Amino acid sequence: MARRKNTEKPKTSKVHGYIDGAGQIVQKGVNETLEENYMPYAMSVIMSRAIPEIDGFKPSHRKLLYTMYKMNLLSASRTKSANIVGQTMKLNPHGDSAIYDTMVRLSRGYEALLHPFVDSKGNFGKFYSRDMAWAASRYTEAKLDEICKELFRDIDKDTVDFVDNYDNQMKEPTLLPASFPTVLVNANTGIAVGMASSICPFNLAEICKATINLIKTPDADLFEVLQAPDFPGGGQIIFDRKIMEKIYETGRGSFRVRSRYSYDKAANCIDVTQIPPTTTVEAIVEKVIDLVKQGKLKEISDIRDETGLDGLKITIDLKRGVEPDRLMQKLFKLTALEDSFSCNFNVLIAGMPKVMGVTELLEEWIAFRVECVKRRTYFDLKKKKEKLHLLEGLQAILLDIDKAVRIVRETDEETEVVPNLMIGFGIDEIQAEYVAEIKLRHLNREYILKRTQEIENLLKDIQELESILSSKTKVNNIIVKELTEVAEKYGQPRKSMIIYADEIEDVDITEEIPDYPVHVFFSQEGYFKKIMPQSLRMSGEQKLKEGDEHVLQVETSNTADLLFFSDKAKVYKMKASEFPDTKASVLGEYIPAKVQMEDDEKAMSMVVTKDYSGFLLFCFENGKIAKVELSAYQTKTNRRKLVNAYSDKSPLVGVLAMEEDSDILLTASSGRMLLIHSAVILPKTTKNTQGVAAMTMKKGQSLMKVSLYQEGDLQNPSRYKKKIPALGALPTADEETGEQLSLS
């Protein structure tokens, strides 16, 4: 796209600051527009909104929790949520509603996290309910949960970097120095631009032990202590070692989570008390009601949501004689009572999004924590060295306190006190300043001796801190010790049960279809009827469209499969049970509309089968015949449409379904007929084979119809039997007046 540039600088009018050329349309290229306008937005969403960092938090979480920390809500009593929201707006320049929503999702009352960070009071809704709204911020109260002590441990000791807030009036941390891997302990999901993040939660005690093992043995097997995730809502995790190994290694994959339930024999009902984290109570209830209305769940008499103060509960009333376990297996497959959780461990590392497995993510956290411990140690070392330096100056005046007093007293000007002390005792300015500030009441030997006795302890502490900074092992031991303390203090038993995929019995939940004899009819125009024998006997003449006729009538059963071949080389599969029982007096179902064919597509033929035995003969206008095993059209999945069902090189004349080889009669447009045995045509492995030449066609001629040969159809059948390919023979005058079979 062309761009029109104006190289002249805009001229500002003296009247009302008017700019010449304002409002003119300037054309820009799409690429340039995206780079200038869309890319900054995309990067902002990725970096500052949707993707968590190594401490396990998005910026909105971190700003909220740090605000609560500065409000002294780690130890104080709760305050109104509205107060917290208002204070957080100093760091988070978004609306109060967005901030409050963030706090709700971090709260204990919402029950979305294994270890909530906000100790809440009031109605905070429930993560498993779509319709249970939380109360407004003016009604609820909150404070930081006790586990937040581990998030802010030594944050005031320069363990992490601080930056200015959006108006440069305050400082806020870029990360929180969490003493345990919060990034894997609490679930975190987010959708950015062009990427997303979905991290499943793990048990705190297990993740701490796994991290300790990784610190001690870098190639440790995580599955020894960290077998599977753990969800706050419980449920049952279907464990497959290969799937879980892929998630642990790559950070991508999905696993199945199913609900937990119990059967109340006295009330004849099922109580579902734990559901997957990806769904809600309302969604499950609505789906079950919909399935009952469709007639797919005839075992259920009622379902209701009985969630209350005791927690989640969905009650399903059963009809008499229903087996509860079999019904639940059916519900697992038909509803979200069993659902998959997709993992995408996408985390910002040094400002760059990176998808990592569990091991790599823990290694990144260990590196982050090592840096925090080193910075904390260096901060303590610096403070102790500063204090030691002051006490060494204090020790210097211990030799002659009277001299120090005399120097101060004899100094004429106050500004000369510090320089004179420096000269008198050989100490530097900082030490002299410290000595000069000592109160008169402290100028006694006892006070000074107590202060100087600290020097020995400080020297030991400094030596220990320096040894920590120079030893990787000691830093790792500190991290291990802290992780052990966290696991012992805050660890909880697993909430999600682990069941093994190979132990689950795969129950066939296919709806039982009533099996009874039926007659099926297929007309030349593509109309279909299914009529019961007794109804057929009582019926009168078959109703058809004008000019239409039945080309196929088959006696079969209600469980048979129906294959409808179209003129577009496609086959549409349905079951006879999917069509209603009807009468001869109705027109029937129009197959192109029923199976949703294209507008210009026509139903050519129908094949009826129950076990897909036998073979099909596809006869084409060019005189070729293709022989394909019927089993080639059998599929394990419930596929409704197969493309390339036969060759489209020449128009299809007819399809013959045969259990065994027999004679077939071919008739060309020239009137010639050819009688061949189907055994001479060898079957092909591919469905869309062009077949073999059976009847030779002269220019302008084509095969017109094909039918199974019945005894008596021809007066002299041997006259028409030829070795293929052959032209066939013209019928005699007597045979032309005879009656031939219909096209099928």
Image (cartoon, rainbow, N blue to C red):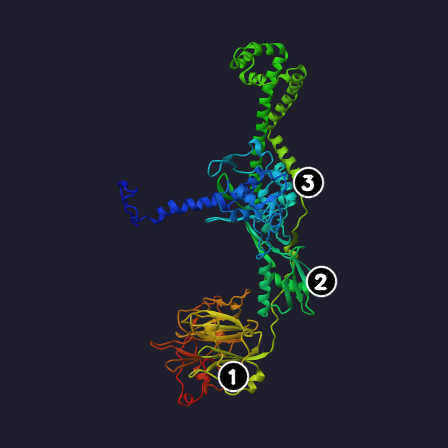
Query: What amino acid type is highlighted by mark number 2?
Result: Asp
In this view, 182 is above or below 127: above
Q: Which residue is mark 2?
A: 264
Q: Which residue is mark 1?
A: 584
Q: State the CA–CA distance, disc 3 to disc 2.
A: 37 Å
Disc 3: CA contacts within 10 A as few (<14), some (14-19) or many (>=20) = few
Q: Are marks 3 and 1 in contact (CB under 8 Å)?
A: no
Residue type pointed to by label 1: Ala
The x, y position of residue 545, in whole percent, is 44, 82
x%, y% of residue 157? Answer: 57, 31
- Pointer 1 or 2: first along the chain: 2
Q: Secondary structure at mark 2?
A: strand
User: How many labels were placed on the picture?
Assistant: 3
Residue 555 versus residue 29 in the image, above or below: below
| Amino acid beneath label 3 | Glu
Q: Relative to residue 576, is residue 728 drawn left or right? A: left
